[in-house]
Amino acid sequence: MSKSPKFIVVAGTSAGGIRAVEELVMQLTPGMDAAFFVVLHLSRKGIGEFLFQRLQKSTSLICKVANDGEAIEKGVIYLARPDNHLLVSQGRVIVGRGARENGWRPSINNLFRSAAASYNSRVIAIILTGMLDDGATGMRSVKRCGGTCIVQDPNEADYPDMPLSVLNTMEVDHVVSLSKMGALLFDIMDNTDDIIQTIVPADVQSEALIDERVSTRIDDISQFEKISVNCPDCGGGLYVTQKEPPTHYRCHVGHSYSERELLIRVSEVMENTFWTSLRMMEERRTILMNLHKKDLERGYLKTSERHLRLAKEMEVHIENLKRILFTATEVD
């Protein structure tokens, strides 16, 4: 009897996700001809083993932390390792520490995109509670490859940002209560006889291949359109890898962002740069004042006055920069 699943179910969640995933896996049954993959943003050091133990108590299916290179088997729930991306490719699990996407590793987008590229119409993607918009770009890839897209009803989600970010950029197949997702999955699998393979769009295939590489070659990314904004994390050039909403950007080494996340990250880097500049300006003023006092004590009036003048000019710059920092508009 084949262990290969007919369907690949991928689920992503963030804030409020432990309870949501626990409720979801309670509804999964051995009769479902599928393998299940879960990315939870709260997966930090140590939480992977904790989550595995907690979820295993809630399901009769096999629950495990994913291992790189292992074969995908039906009836198994694979959890992303802490601080590692989880991908799937042609019957195998891929676990790796590639560049962060939208600031996250593991990334929901990476998992969804890899599933869409390898399994297209056999993919069922689920977005649960969470903040910001990781998963929206990946969900678009699943839709374009013929997969089924499911979103938790944002009215009941503890944190509705992630479900809403999907709904605001695309039309999904189902918006349902978390308590009804198990029945919906069973219905989709039970009423799908022949799965029609779809052609994977070239850009989805290209990005999925890039995701599999820890380090990206320049000729892999240069096929996309370059923009005038540089990567906020490494300073490299950014390319548009998905033009359809939500727009998606990636740099040479693999850092990738949605448009909203790019704005947030650029704003963070800009603010950090300003604070660093403020500290250095304060230090420069202090040094100038020290030189002024020493020169004054030694009777070097001309250089003493010069250092005092420069210190006062620096004070003006410091006050201007403080005004910018303390009145900056918060990024939504």
Image: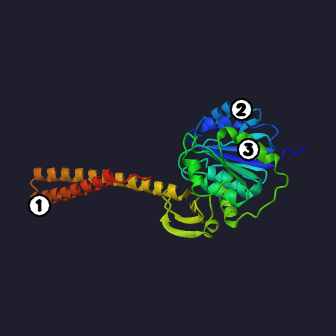
Residue drawn at 64 percent across, 55 percent down: 138
Image quadrant in which you'd find residue 316: bottom left
Q: Which residue is mark 3?
A: 184
Measured as percent of width and height from the top left, residue 126 is found at 67, 47
Check residue 38 in the rendering and tell me which mark sits there, or answer none: none
Tell me the kind of residue under disc 3: Leu
Residue 202 seen: yes
Helix, strand or loop at mark 2: helix
Tell me the kind of residue under disc 2: Gln
Q: Dot 1, crowdedness within 10 Å: few (<14), some or many (≥20)? A: few
In this rendering, the label closer to the viewer, 3 or 2: 3
Q: Which residue is mark 1?
A: 302
Q: Which residue is mark 2?
A: 56
Q: What's the distance in space between the residues labelled 1 and 2, CA to CA?
A: 78 Å
In the visual, does 302 lie left or right of 20?
A: left
Measured as percent of width and height from the top left, residue 287 is found at 23, 51
Residue drawn at 76 percent across, 64 percent down: 199
Q: Indicate which disc, 1 or 2, sits on the residue closer to the N terminus.
A: 2
Measured as percent of width and height from the top left, residue 179 is found at 67, 37
Image quadrant in which you'd find residue 19: top right
